[in-house]
Image (spheres, coloured by chain):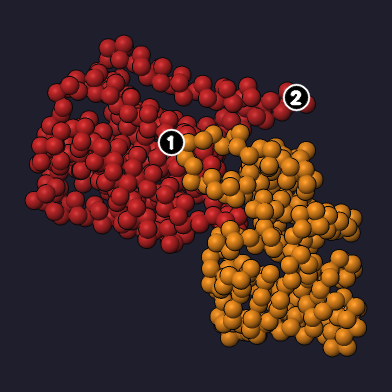
Amino acid sequence: MLIIENLKKTFDGFVAINGVSLSIPKGAISSIIGPNGAGKTTLFNLITGHIPVDQGKLTFKGVDITGLSPDRICRLGIGRSFQRANIFPRLTVLESVQAAVLVHHGMGFNFFKAVKSLFLKETESILKMVGLFDDRDAVSHSLSYGAQKQLELGIALASEPELLLLDEPTAGMSVQETKKTIELIERIVREKGLTLLFTEHDMEVVFSISQRITVLHQGKVIAEGPPDQVKNDPFVQKVYIGESR
Amino acid sequence: MLKLKKESLILPSFVLLAIFLPLTESRFYVFMGTDILIMSLFAVSLNLLLGYTGLVSFGQAAYFGIGAYTCALLMKKASVAFPIAFIASAFLGAVSALIIGYFCVRLTKIYFAMLTLAFAQIVWAVAFKWSSLTGGDTGLLGVPFPLYLDSPVRFYYFTLVIVTASIYALWKIVNSPFGRLLVTIRENPERTEFIGVNVRRYQLTAFMIAGFFSGISGALFGVFNHSVFPDYIYWNRSAETLIMVILGGMYNFLGPIMGVAMLLYIRMLVTSYTQYWPLILGLILAILLFFFPTGILGFLQEKFASDKKTVKC
């Protein structure tokens, strides 16, 4: 579904991504792990067009998406969430998700329809899915951090992406919240038949739901494969898993 | 639901009040009313950018002035009929906003504000220096007044119809899907891109719509005053209108109208006692920013909401 070929990104001489090549198969749950500064978020930012690619090629469903703007990449079917909850603070929960639903249905440039009653059923079904239906009239910034991350997930799902990129979906959450969120993500991904690529610090989470794991270290892929294979890779144990113990 | 009904009744109530204003038979109130109506349209169109899209346009007077000059020049120098000149001024307001906005939306925050100001000052300089066309510093005097509008009351009603229709159109726009996306851009432009929105295109469209309605208000203002001056475009008009919007409340659709009515009334009172109006204006702005950051309507709304909460508790 997504093919990354020899991707490179440098910031003021610092090589953040150094020749990464990766293939994300359709329908799989894949994760990217690596120590802080390994380049996980940079890789997400490159895939989604948030920052320009220096070198290499990104192909999504056979289409070259290298250099495309984030909005075009989103419309092609890649949705994402951010490491720190990135929401519309003064909009209500319902308004936030509804905005994304409107864009997905090509209604953005409609100037005269009353927005209040548009796509309510679709919006509410997404809110039910992410467990925020009861908070639909709450102002987004008043939500707990965990709920804000759920809202972000709802906003990302509203675009009906085929590939969902989640950047540390449980960052800053308690153990209980983490467990709940991971169950929620896994259920949604299976129900909707999505392809999921996520980054995560919590190794338990990573190894419990990933079908494929990629290990990044200093901007390079040092291991890639099913969880068992990655877990037993001596180099991975040395540079990453060993470090976190 | 009840709240929604109440909100949608405010605008018709204003219009009803405005319809009966000439019954006071006071030339002063009719004059003041016309001024407030025209400036209200200008302020509401500016607020589409400031309050709804999060774009601080510091040069909105450019489109106001372009509207005023287009209408006056077409009527005075090319003997074009008023309705055509009037429509042309709205379109020229939009087209010039499209051209200038194309460059401005490439920048963000303070750089956007400064570029809008820079372009507005260029427009002002053209109006000021191109004496053979614009009359330079003297401006265009004796703009021919259409005969069928040649009474203050008639012109007042004409203005009321145009301003009401324009503000209604703007109200529809801010409550449309497009309006919702402008607010998401205001709240978080980066995140909005990732829901599939071409942020610059939306900002530019909003800029063009604001230019269109600013052009209309400028054309009305020129005809209302029978003359057009480069002052219409000067930066202090942009700044004063920004203050009006902030005074009334930029997060409220009707806030700018309240700000215009209050500021014009206060200005009229102050200038009859002293010539230090800019000093008073500065004081008003300082008090606003310290004590009423959400504007008068915003303050009242918050107070009303917290009072209701207290009663509930």
| Element carrying mark 1 | helix
| Place of residue B7 in the rendered image (x, y in percent of width and height, measured from the top left) | 55, 25
| Left or right, residue A52 beside residue B26 | right
| Element carrying mark 2 | helix
| Place of residue B55 in the rendered image (x, y in percent of width and height, measured from the top left) | 46, 51
Disc 2 is attached to a residue of which chain? Answer: B
Residue B282 seen in this snapshot: no
- Residue at label 2? B312
User: Is residue B214 depicted above or below B12 in this figure?
Assistant: below
Task: Name the residue nearer the viewer: B304 or A210.
Answer: A210
Q: Which mark is residue B170?
A: 1
Query: What residue sits 44% from the left and 39% below the top?
Result: B245
| Place of residue B39 in the rendered image (x, y in percent of width and height, measured from the top left) | 34, 34
Task: Name the residue nearer the viewer: B65 or B248.
Answer: B65
The number of numbered badges drawn on the structure is: 2
Asked if marks 2 and 1 touch (Cβ < 8 Å), the reply is no
Q: Residues within 10 Å of mark 2 (few under 14, many from 20)?
A: few
Q: Quadrant of residue A162?
A: bottom right
| Earlier residue among tags 2 and 1 | 1
User: Is residue A71 depicted above or below B78 in this figure?
Assistant: below
Query: What residue sits 44% from the left and 62% below the top?
Result: B107
Which kind of residue does numbered mark 1 sit on? Answer: Leu
Quadrant that contains the N terminus of chain A: bottom right
| Place of residue A35 in the rendered image (x, y in percent of width and height, measured from the top left) | 78, 78
Residue A147 seen in this snapshot: yes
Query: What residue sits 72% from the left and 72% below the top?
Result: A24
| Left or right, residue B162 beside residue A100 | left
Chain coloured orange: A
Q: Quadrant of residue A174?
A: bottom right
The colour with which the image depicts chain B is: red
> Does label 1 lie on the same chain as label 2?
yes
